[in-house]
Amino acid sequence: MKKLAVIVPCYNEELVIAESYRRTREALHKLPVLTEIIYINDGSRDRTRLMLDEIAASDPQVKVIHFSRNFGHQPAVTAGINNCDADLAVILDADMQDPPELIPSILELQEKEQANVVYCVRKSREGEGLFKKVTAKAFYRMLNYMSDVNFPLDTGDFRMIDRKVMDQFDRFQERGKYIRGLISWVGFKQVPFYYEREARIAGETKYPFSKMWKFATTAMLYFSKKPLRLATSLGFIAVLVGIILAVWFTLGKIYGFSNAETGWTSIMTSVIFFGGVQLLTVGVLGQYVGILFDEIKARPEYIIDEKKNF
Ligand code: UDP
Ligand code: MG
């Protein structure tokens, strides 16, 4: 019989764990397959650890991985996939924004289409601020423009993947994982499933602006070399502007149509402009060098403190 695992990363989710577990369990009960839930406690400092241990003690079909500290959402999901031996896995947020009640329909679609990936596309997003909605929309479109891969738009990590995809995913060595991107990138048969994203049932987002920014830049830098190309183009434009200005001022000096002595404005403008271009291009370059630095150190992506029910 096939086995389906649900992978749930949790960071300071004491307010949602109980309800989240109850709803996920109930949704799984109805399925004609073996099921299990893998919770990854991403270094929570609240009662999440305790609560997950209690659930694992009473339910042998619940596995728990405790990280040694907070490593982040993407490393937590990565650990879930790396430690999953099921035939199918669903990646789910703990806050129930992605309703587990949809799992039976997703499984049905997966079986009907014989798909390797069913990715869930957000038709709408409930209970999220305008800022989050606008930045998320802009991010997915910008990433598609910047990268050579065509990612499905408005799609989070909520998806079902099969063994084939998990086996390929386990081979990825890179430390800055943009999981939804990598799963698109592996190919095979991928089909969309449309749903309405709900509001968080309790608690607050664990993605403050700083984490969102890190997430977005990791995706851009790991999936695109376009910023480097744009930096080069900017350099070309700057050189062109410089040449035109030089010619203009020289001719102006000779034929007397530009008064170079009073040229304070033009000097300031070009100094600031070229200074800006240089800082920007060096900054972009620095970002990629930073990635190389991290990759060469080759530190583990996450450290596991304890595993339960494995
Ligand atoms: N999460 C995590 N580690 C982190 C931040 C978030 O494991 O450092 C988990 C969190 O517990 C939740 C999921 O990732 O299950 C998505 O986070 P959240 O709902 O806060 O993000 P949002 O939906 O607001 O983008
Ligand atoms: Mg959420």
Image: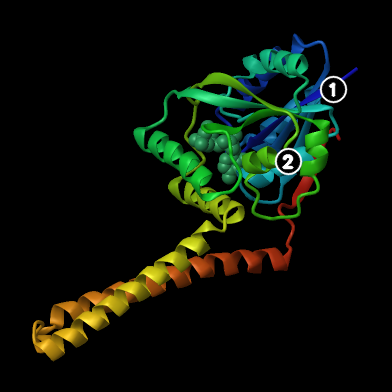
Who's the residue at 57% across and 33% down the image? 152
Looking at the rendered structure, the number of numbered marks drawn on it comes to: 2
Pinpoint residue 198: horizontal percent, then vertical percent: 50, 21
Q: Secondary structure at mark 2?
A: helix
Residue 64 placement: quadrant? top right
Where, quadrant-wise, is the N terminus in this rendering?
top right
Tell which tag, 2 or 1, sits nearer the viewer.
2
Say whether residue 122 is visible. yes
Q: Is mark 2 within 8 Å of ligand 1?
A: no
Mark 2 / mark 1, whichever is N-terminal:
1
Q: Work out whether residue 157 or residue 304 is closer to the camera in this orientation and state it.
A: 157
Mark 1, residue position: 3
Pinpoint residue 210: horizontal percent, then vertical percent: 46, 51
Who's the residue at 20% across and 80% down the image? 248
* 3D distance between C-alphas at marks 2 and 1: 22 Å
Say whether residue 201 is visible. no
Q: Which mark is residue 141?
A: none
Q: Amino acid at mark 1?
A: Lys
Q: Work out whether residue 17 or residue 40 is closer to the camera in this orientation and state it.
A: 40
Q: Is residue 37 left or right of residue 14?
A: right
Pinpoint residue 296: horizontal percent, then vertical percent: 71, 68
